[in-house]
Image: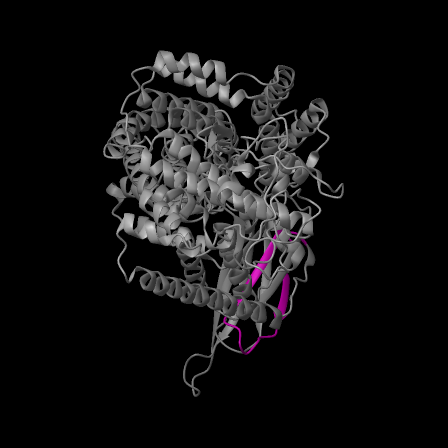
Amino acid sequence: MHLEGRDGRRYPGAPEVELLQTSVPPGLAELAAGKRRPPRGAGGVDPSHSCPSGAAGQSSWAPAGQEFASFLTKGRSHSPLPQMSSSRSKDSCFTENTPLLRNSLQEKGSRCIPVYHPEFITAEESWEDGSADWERRYLLSREVSGLSASASSEKGDLPDSPHVRLRLSKLRCCVQWLKVTGLFVFVVLCSILFSLYPDQGKLWQLLALSPLENYSVNLSSHGDSTLLQVDLAGALVASGPSRSGREERLLVELTQADTSGSRWQRPQQVTHNWTVYLNPRRSERSVMSRTFEVLGRETMSISIRASLQQTQAVPLLMAYQYLRASVEAQVTIATAILAGVYALIIFEVVHRTLAAMLGSLAALAALAVIGDRPSLTHVVEWIDFETLALLFGMMILVAIFSETGFFDYCAVKAYRLSRGRVWAMIIMLCLIAAVLSAFLDNVTTMLLFTPVTIRLCEVLNLDPRQVLIAEVIFTNIGGAATAIGDPPNVIIVSNQELRKMGLDFAGFTAHMFIGICLVLLVSFPLLRLLYWNRKLYNKEPSEIVELKHEIHVWRLTAQRISPASREETAVRRLLLGKVLALEHLLARRLHTFHRQISQEDKNWETNIQELQKKHRISDGILLAKCLTVLGFVIFMFFLNSFVPGIHLDLGWIAILGAIWLLILADIHDFEIILHRVEWATLLFFAALFVLMEALAHLHLIEYVGEQTALLIKMVPEEQRLTAAIVLVVWVSALASSLIDNIPFTATMIPVLLNLSRDPEVGLPAPPLMYALAFGACLGGNGTLIGASANVVCAGIAEQHGYGFSFMEFFRLGFPMMIVSCIVGMCYLLVAHVVVGWN
C-alpha cells in the first residue's frame, strides 16, 4: 500500500517521526519513528496501541497542502513534520511546539484542514460507506477549510445541502442522547433493585436418612411468597425410574392447608409429592431443585422418606427458600430480558458485549426481586472458566503464529490449489473446516482458520465477511458429526444413564456421522444458491479497498491511544492527520479509477508467481517452534477425548501450550501479545454464561422442556415417536439459536429420559437424544450468538477490520439452519420410524 505526493512520486504509507523525549512509551515511539509497520495479525493495528480511548475533545486541525506532503514521506532520512498544537492552543492552526515532534514549518499563513474526531466517524462508516459518501466527506472538509467553492461547482451540490446535513446531525445527536439516557436510567433502576434486596443465602441442613427413620420439619409461611423452592444435594440423579424399578429413591412430601376457599369452609390439606432417585455411585454429588406453590399463610411441613436396599444411612443436604413470583411470571421476565438483549444486538444499539452485560444485570436484578439473589461467589461459579481458558490460550498461540508469515503462505497455497477459481477455494475451505471441527473444538478451528481466510481474501480482493460466515456455518455442521466435536454431544455421551442404554461413543458417532454427511451434501448447493446474486469480489479495485481499510486501521489506532500525556496527544493528532490525508488521497483516486469486477481470475498463474515472491515465511525458526507447540496441543486435545488417564481439560492444555510457546519464542514485549487477545470476546462469553445461568434460575429452560414433554404426550400413541422427533429437533434448534446450547442440553436430557421411562408414553430414549443433538448443534447457525464459534469468528474479524453484523449473519445462517434441520429431521424419521434403527 502506498501514498502519492504532489510531485507524483509514491511513498509508503507509514510516517517517519523523530522523538525528542525518552519518556514516550516504547510502542508509541516505534510507531512515530516509523520503525515498524502495523502488524497484520490484528487487522493492521499495532497491538501496543490498544489502550482505552480518552475523553472526547473537540475537532482537531492539521496543516494541509505542501506542508502535509512531508508527513507522508518515509525513507532512511527523517523528513520535517508539521506543527501540532496542544489542546490549550487558541488558534485554529497548530502554533505550539511539543517536545515529541520536530517542526520546521512554522508559518502563520499555513492553511488548516479539519481532522475528524474518531468518535464522530464510526468503523462501519469507514468501511461500508460507498464512494459517494467518501467524496461527500472530502468535499465537506474542503468547505470547512475555505476550499468549497470549486468542489461545490464540480459536484453540483444543492444550495440547501448544508442545512440538510445540519438537520441530520441534530437528529443523530437527539437519537444518541435518547439512547444514552434510556440505557442509563435502565442501569440505575436495575442497580437500585439489586441493592434493595439482600443476599438471602441458603442454610443447608445435613440429614442422615435411613429406611427406618423419616425426617420432617415445619416451615413458617411468608405473606408475600408464592413459591417454595426446595434444594437437595447429594448422590442424586435427575433421570426417572428404569424398567425394573429397583432404584433407591427418596420421597419428599410437602403438606399445606389450602385456604383459597370461602372463610366458612374448613381448609383442606394438600400434599405434593417429589420423587428423587439416588445415584449408585455415592461419591458423585449433584444438586436438584423443585418449586412448590404456596396456597396460603398456614404452616407447611416437609417430610422425607428413604427407600433403600441397605440399612446404611445416606447423607443428604437440604435447603429451602421462599420466592415472591410464580413460575409463569419468572418465565415472562426471562423472556422479556432475552428479547431485550437480542434487540440491542440486532439493531446494534450497543456492542454485543455490553448488551450481554446489561442482560446479566437485568436478570440478576430480577432474581433479587423474586427473592433468589445470588452471592458474588455464586455468580462467579456460573462462569465456565474452562471455555475462557481455552479461548485465551489459543488466542496467544495464534497471535505469535501470525508473526511468522504462515497465514500469508497458507493463503497463497490455497489460491494455487483452487487454480484461481473462487468458489472452488471457498468450498475447499468450508470442507476442511467441517472435517477439522469434527475432531477439534469448533472454537479452536475458527481461531486457526479466521486469520488465514482473512489474508486469503485480502490477496484475492474478496469480501472476507461472506467467506467467514460460510466457514463458521460449516464448522458448526461438522462439529455435530462426532461425539467430541460439539459440547452438546459431549454432554449426551458422558451421561451415565444413556451409556447403560447402549448410547456409547462409537454408536453415537456412527449415527451422527451419516446424518451430517447428508446435511453437508445439501448445504453446499444451498450455499451456492444463497450466494447466487451476491458479489464476493469487492466493488472497487483492490487499491481502493486497501486504502479504505488502511484508513479504518489508522483511525482505530488513533482511537486506542489514550491522551494521558502531551506526547501521546501529539501522536494521536499525528495519526488523525494521516487519516485525513488518506481520505483526500482516496477521494482523488475515486475520481481516477474505474470500478472493475472480475468474476474469475484469468491470470492466476502470473499472480501466483508474484504472490509467492511477496508473501513468504518471514521467520522460519519461530514457525518451527509454533508448529511444534501447536501440534502437541492438538495431539493432547485428541488424547483428552480418547485416553481417560490424562487429567487435563481443554482449557489447561491451551494455557500450558501458550506458556510453552511464550518461552520458546522469547517474547520480551509481552504487552504486544496481550493486545492481540480478544478481551471483548472473552468478556462477552463471561457475561453470556451469567445471563444464561440466571435465565435458568428463572425457570425459562425448564419451562421449555416441560412444555415440549406435554406436547409429546398429547399426540396419539401410534404417531408419538414421529411427533417427538420433530418437536425435539425444532424446539432444540430454535432454543439453541437464542440461548446457549450447553445449559439447554443439560436441562433437556433428564426431561427426555423421564419421558422415555414414563409407562404411559413408551418412547425409546436414543432417537430423542439424537434429535436433541441435531437440533442443539445445527441450531447454533441460526443467529450470531447461537454458537461460541460464531462469536469468536466475529470478534477476530472485527479486530482485523472486517466485522459483520447480526443481520448479515442471520441472512445466511438462518436459512442454512432451517434446511439443515429439515435434512437431519428427515434422516431421523427414516432411520427410527421407517427402518426402526433404535
Q: Is residue 691 above or below residue 600?
A: below
Residue 189 in view here: yes
Q: The magenta stretch spans which residues? A: 208-233
Nearest the eye: 307 or 120: 120
Residue placed at 57% from the left, 26% from the top? Answer: 402
**What colour scheme was applied to this rendering of the protein?**
one colour
Q: Is residue 549 above or below residue 359?
A: above
Please state if 807 lies on the left or on the right of 486 as rendered: left
In this view of the protein, which residue sits in the foreground, 20 or 111? 111
User: Where residue 49 appears, x then y in whole percent?
Assistant: 62, 42
Q: Residue at x 54, y 20 (%)?
A: 406
Whether 70 is among the magenta residues is no
Residue 692: x and y in percent read 50, 52
Above or below, 113 against 832 in this view is below
Q: Going 28% across and 29% down the picture, which residue do you hit?
A: 596
Residue at the bottom extreme, as displayed:
264
Q: Quarter of the image containing the C terminus?
A: top left
Give the percent coordinates (x, y) of residue 582. 46, 40
**How many circles with numbers are drawn on the protein?**
0
- Let me know if residue 508 appears in the view: no
Q: Where on the picture, by quarter, is residue 824?
A: top left
Q: Answer with left or right where residue 752 lies relative to residue 648.
A: left
Horizontal and vertical percent position of residue 381: 63, 50
Q: Nearer the viewer, residue 285 or 805?
A: 805
Determine which quarter of the picture holds residue 264. bottom left
Question: Could you tell whether 830 is left or right of 418 in the image?
Answer: left
